[in-house]
Amino acid sequence: MGIIKHTHHNIELDSPGKDSYQLRKAGSKAVLLTGENRSQLTLEEPFSGKFFEVFKILQCDLVIVEGMANAPWPKLEIHRQAYSEPRYFPEDKTIQALVTDQSQKYSAMGECIDLNRIDELGFWVLSFLEKNRVF
């Protein structure tokens, strides 16, 4: 599994004065920091769909993307009653299902998954992956 987390903040994971920081500032498009237990890839360009190739190389069966609501790929919208109404469901046709604590209220509008039934969500995701293999 892989995860892409979108942020509106200007991210800086490296430290000024370090070789990797200076190399990136000098014009390197990509810097891979690697150690005994983990690696970190920093790319000097905005996100694009070509970044999914990294997850293919790493043989990820599933990539979860948090944020990027306007992206064209299939998605789930997560909604809790305490946080108002769903923002995109059912108008956004890329939303495959609404995961909510009010599934009975919205079920007539499209596919809904009970937020409190993690087993139901897991089965839904596995079924979706079997039918819609992207990688």
Image (cartoon, helix red, strand yellow):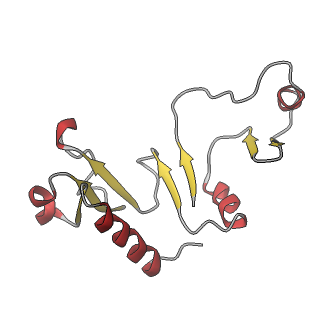
User: In the drawing, does residue 67 fall left or right of residue 39?
Assistant: left
User: In the drawing, does residue 16 fall left or right of residue 132?
Assistant: right
In the depicted view, which residue is nearer to us: 116 or 25? 116
Q: Quadrant of residue 67?
A: top left
Q: Residue furthest top?
A: 17
Residue visible at 56% across and 52% down in the picture: 3
Residue 44 percent across, percent down from the top left: 74, 38
Residue visible at 39% across and 77% down in the picture: 127
Quadrant assignment for the C terminus: bottom right
Q: Residue furthest front?
A: 36
Quadrant assignment for the N terminus: bottom right
User: In the drawing, does residue 84 fall left or right of residue 35?
Assistant: left
Residue 30 percent across, percent down from the top left: 81, 42
Residue visible at 53% across and 43% down in the picture: 5
Residue 114 percent across, percent down from the top left: 22, 59
Residue visible at 16% across and 58% down in the picture: 103
- Give the mark count: 0
Q: Is residue 116 above or below residue 84?
A: below
Q: Quadrant of residue 46?
A: top right
In the depicted view, which residue is nearer to us: 49 or 106? 106
Q: Is residue 122 above or below residue 47?
A: below
In the depicted view, which residue is nearer to us: 47 or 85? 85
